[in-house]
Image: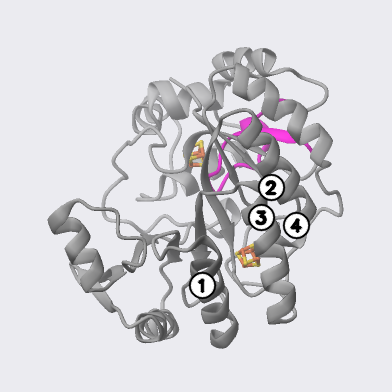
Amino acid sequence: MFHPDEVIFAPTGQCNLSCLHCGVSRPSATLPAAAAIAFLEECGTGGIEKVGFSGGEPFLEPDFLCEVSQAAVGLGMLFDRLMTNAVWFKDEAGLKAILGRLFEAGFDGKFGVSVDSWHEQDIDKLLLFIASVFEIWGRRDCVDILSVRAPDEGAALEKLASIARRFSGELILEKGEPAMICDNGFEARLATGEDIPEALSIDVYRFPCSAPAHAGSWKAEAWFVDDFCEGPGNVLYVHPNGAVAACCGFANENPSLLLGRIGIDGLSAMMANAASNPQVVACYQTGLGKTRTLLEAAGTVFPGKTDDQCFFCDWLCAKSLIGKG
Ligand code: SF4
Ligand code: SF4
């Protein structure tokens, strides 16, 4: 079942980078903070505990981030991630001024920094962003790295190694993949259970690169294993135009995954829409794996197999295959 515990605001679709894999549309509309705060209040009283930020590059709308963070603190909500490419600022003074305001506003979630071969970041700016966050928040465990796999992993590995070197840490691999950047302080924290703010601890999360429906991604040897959208699911994702989607996954701009619009539809109406929305029910309740077998039994022939649920979801949306009698 769809049971969101977080609301994510994307204040803008605009971005200072142009990553080749990016699937985010670039509407000129930006989300007004007042409308977001009104919806946040509804979410807070409606049992949704967490708030996060995404985009586009959300730091292009710093006033929004500060105002909504302050409101979230007032509502007693918890912060999840603020996603960023970390290189949106012009100079160090500007960077620290905005981070300082966000700190004063009460944001104490994690910074989800995108680091992979797709994001063409200036390494010095990337390192300055992380160092400034560590300095202003007074701890070195408030950054996560979100990393999308690419055919050439060289740039990703070099950037991760640079981060490890800059902060005197070590890049830890698990099953051959980057998993963490940490230092001896982190080991001590694990051993003693003490909170050691200066301990370096940056988790690295790796993700597949989803292909859009039109590109096709049908060459897998086996079908995906259903996880009922465990990763990017169960959030209310507010797009810059106020439309609210049922996840922060790759396909979340499809009309089939939209539940309503802030300022027009209330939270309870959106939840009622989710309960009767065939695409949402297929993803969260039936399961996309079972949905696939039901479609095949009804005569649908897929071009091949895919191991990527969000691509499969996007393809079903594009073909309007769910909800047909
Ligand atoms: S930083 Fe993010 S939003 Fe910006 S172009 Fe890259 S993937 Fe898209
Ligand atoms: S499968 Fe669909 S609903 Fe689930 S997370 Fe992916 S895009 Fe969102």
| Residue at mark 4 | 62
> Within the displayed image, which quadrant is ligand 1 positioned in?
bottom right
The nearer-to-camera label among 1 and 3 is 3
C-alpha distance separating marks 4 and 3: 8 Å
Q: Is residue 120 above or below residue 79?
A: below
State the image coordinates of residue 35 (x, y, percent, origin top left). 81, 33
Q: Quadrant of the C terminus?
A: top right
| Residue at mark 3 | 102
Q: Is mark 3 within 8 Å of ligand 1?
A: no
Q: Quadrant of the N terminus?
A: top left
| Residue at mark 2 | 10
Among the two numbered marks 3 and 2 on one chain, the one whose residue lies closer to the N terminus? 2
State the image coordinates of residue 136 (x, y, percent, origin top left). 56, 65
The nearer-to-camera label among 1 and 2 is 1
- Mark 4: few/some/many CA within 10 Å (<14, 14-19, 20+): some
C-alpha distance separating marks 4 and 2: 12 Å
- Mark 1: few/some/many CA within 10 Å (<14, 14-19, 20+): some
Say what amino acid the circle numbered 3 marks: Leu
Say what amino acid the circle numbered 4 marks: Pro
C-alpha distance separating marks 3 and 2: 16 Å
- Residue placed most toward the observer, 244 or 214: 244
* Residue 17 in view here: no
Among the two numbered marks 4 and 3 on one chain, the one whose residue lies closer to the N terminus? 4
